[in-house]
Image (cartoon, rainbow, N blue to C red):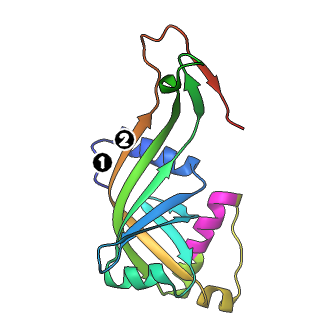
Amino acid sequence: MGLKSIEEREHVERVIKECTLCNVGMVDEEGVPYVIPMNFGYEEGVIYLHSAQEGRSITILEKNPLVCITFSTFTALSWQHEEVACSYRLQGESVICYGRVQFEEDHEEKVRALNRIMHHYTGREFSYSDPAVKNVKVWKVAIEEASVREFGKPSKNALRFRTSRPM
């Protein structure tokens, strides 16, 4: 996965598993970026996604399978002083992953991937009709490189620090 340590890999995996949505970025033939939010499943360094069989993302990925996938958690809105705008910050963690999309065509592997996605959200597996499996495009992205970051940590020198959940 291109990570420096086991601890970093575990941190990446923890952040990914906490997220309910990822953003998948790709670049078309003219160099125009295209980013879409997607639901996903994750298992052992592989991100599973699904979509319709056709569309702009499929057209792009058939020519350039490279993707950047981002995940971001949100834990709190914090500030050092309520009346000072620049003292506000969002706290959380993010992961940026790079890889190549491979479209899965094998029926059993598609079912396995779909169950990874469903397990991420429901904790369970499902059965699928043959037409449902046939009519979905399953994306498999082995993570080639990943990085994890924490953001919005309060300064150790802060005199006051409060946290609030936004509405």
Look at 42% across and 10% down and name the residue there. Answer: 157
Which of the 4 image quarters holds residue 150? top left
Look at 62% across and 86% down and name the residue there. Answer: 133
Residue 104 falls inside the magenta stretch: no
Look at 52% across and 78% down and name the residue there. Answer: 138
**Considering the image in quadrants, where does the C terminus appear?**
top right
| Left or right: 45 in relation to 76 | left
Q: Looking at the picture, does residue 29 appear above or below residue 20? A: below
**Considering the image in quadrants, where does the N terminus appear?**
bottom left
Specify start and end residues of the magenta stretch as a single range: 112-121
Look at 32% across and 84% down and name the residue there. Answer: 63
- Asked if the residue at tag 2 contacts the one at tag 1, i.e. Cβ–Cβ closer than 8 Å, the answer is yes
Looking at the magenta stretch, what is its main secondary structure? helix
Q: Position of residue 39 (x, y in %)?
A: 58, 64
Is there any visible trace of residue 123 in the rendered image? no
Could you tell which of marks 1 and 2 lies nearer the N-terminus? Answer: 1
- Helix, strand, or loop for circle 1? loop
Dot 1, how many residues are within 10 Å of its Cα: few (below 14), some (14-19), or many (20+)?
some
* Observer-nearest of 81 and 107: 81
What amino acid type is highlighted by mark number 2? Glu
Mark sitting on residue 3: 1
